[in-house]
Image: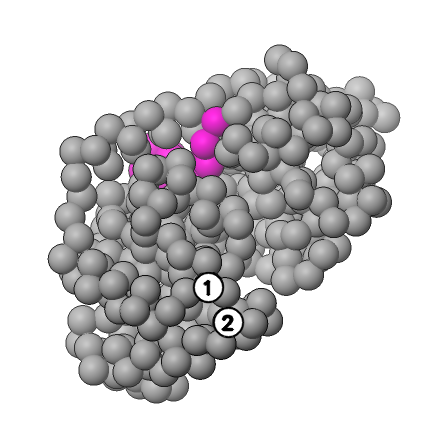
Amino acid sequence: MKKTAVVVGPYRVHNFGDDLVGAIIAKRLQQVGYDVVIPKLGQSNANWIGTEFAESYDGIFDKADTIVVGGGGIMSDTSGAKPGASYLDIVARAAIAGKTQGKRMFVTSVGAGPWKLPRSKMLAFGISMMADKIGVRDQESFDHLASIGIRGPKVVLGADCALLSKDYLPFEPVSSGKIGIQLNTGQFPEAEANTAFPAIKDAIDAYVSANSSNVVLLSNGHRKSPLASVAPTCETLEYGNLDTYLARLSGLRSVLTSHLHIAITAYSQRIPTFSLYVREKTKRFYDQIGRPERAIDITKASVDDLQKFLDAAECAEWSEKDEETLTRLQRQARSLLSFIE
């Protein structure tokens, strides 16, 4: 009889990057002989990757042989727009359900820490103690876990599994040769602390309006980019299901984004990527790929910084150095899946 695995993660909001990592983990589990269910991933995504559809966790843990927690900054309390807007409670319930029923439990391709709330640090510690193995996507997450006493062979340092989209997911790129722009910073009040931010917004508006035939306005959720209101003739790409989104995203010539997983996925498709970032985790990624000059904190950015990125996005090429780095990071990402058996 086939084994069953449940993948637990931040899938209820249907954020592209989180759903992508969940799908890759599911395909790995299928490779090693599991039937897989990812609650809340959505019917169309479940159909595409061949997993069981479920809209709730009711009864799921009871029938699973293995529980895998994966995707996103779910081992921190800063993955949402404010401290505490995280998935640590869901993950803790999954860990307890698994441990009390003698099931194996893995955590992988996650960001861990920092923790602003003592309760969050306590939950992360408890989850880590119950896990059979933990895979983190960057050195900072590895160090955060070590700071609360979680270290040794249980913890594997790798790279984000979104780098493996081509390895695990079947899609054909739809080439447009356009620049993808995603800068939905309205949800992040931190950006307003930058006195140059209104001018940056005006400059982005002016650019997409003047270059509408050469731009795709990206959104990592189901809502249209707010930039669509100033450039109504621009092509838009909203996330509805993984296969369509991946096909169109992978056909871009370059990307300017404020969000981590659009940057990671573009990079995995050999697309030059630039970021005015909001979250520190995005800076970590650009450090990993050896392109720190392509990421600037939006709370400190200037209009000149934006213009520099836009100019570079129009002519940037994938380099031999990029290829060597991608190959190395993909090898590290595979290490976060290889222990799931």
Percent x, y of residue 177: 16, 60
The circle on residue 300 is: 1
Is disc 2 surrounded by few (<14), some (14 to 19) or many (20+) residues within 10 Å?
Answer: some
Task: List the residue tagged with mark 2.
Answer: 194
Q: Can residue 323 be seen from the camera position used here?
A: yes
The secondary structure type at the circle numbered 2 is loop
Residue 293 colored magenta? no
* Quadrant assignment for the C terminus: top right
Q: How are the residues colored? A: one colour
Seen at 19% across and 64% down, the residue is 311
Tell me the quarter of the picture where residue 204 sits: bottom left
Q: How many circles with numbers are drawn on the protein?
A: 2
Depth check, front residue: 78 or 34: 78
On screen, residue 278 versus residue 171, left or right, reads right
Q: Which badge, 2 or 1, comes first in the chain's sequence?
A: 2
Residue 276 vertical position relative to residue 286 in the rendered view, above or below: below
Q: Note whether 262 is above or below 212 in the view shown.
A: above
Residue type at tag 1 = Lys
Q: Position of residue 34 (x, y in %)?
A: 56, 26
Q: Nearer the viewer, residue 53 or 137?
A: 137
Q: Are marks 2 and 1 in contact (CB under 8 Å)?
A: yes
Instruction: Tell me the amino acid under the disc marked 2.
Output: Asn
Instruction: Give the residues drawn in magenta, as a range.
Output: 158-168
Q: Residues within 10 Å of mark 1 (few under 14, many from 20)?
A: some
Identify which residue is drawn at 24% across, 28% down.
Answer: 324
Q: Nearer the viewer, residue 80 or 245?
A: 80
Residue 176 place in picture, x, y as percent: 18, 62
Q: Quadrant of the N terminus?
A: top right
* Apparent side of residue 217 relative to residue 139 in the rendered image (left or right): left
Magenta region, mostly helix, strand or loop? helix
Residue 162 drawn in magenta: yes
Question: What is the distance, in whole Å, between disc 2 and disc 1 at their CAs?
Answer: 6 Å
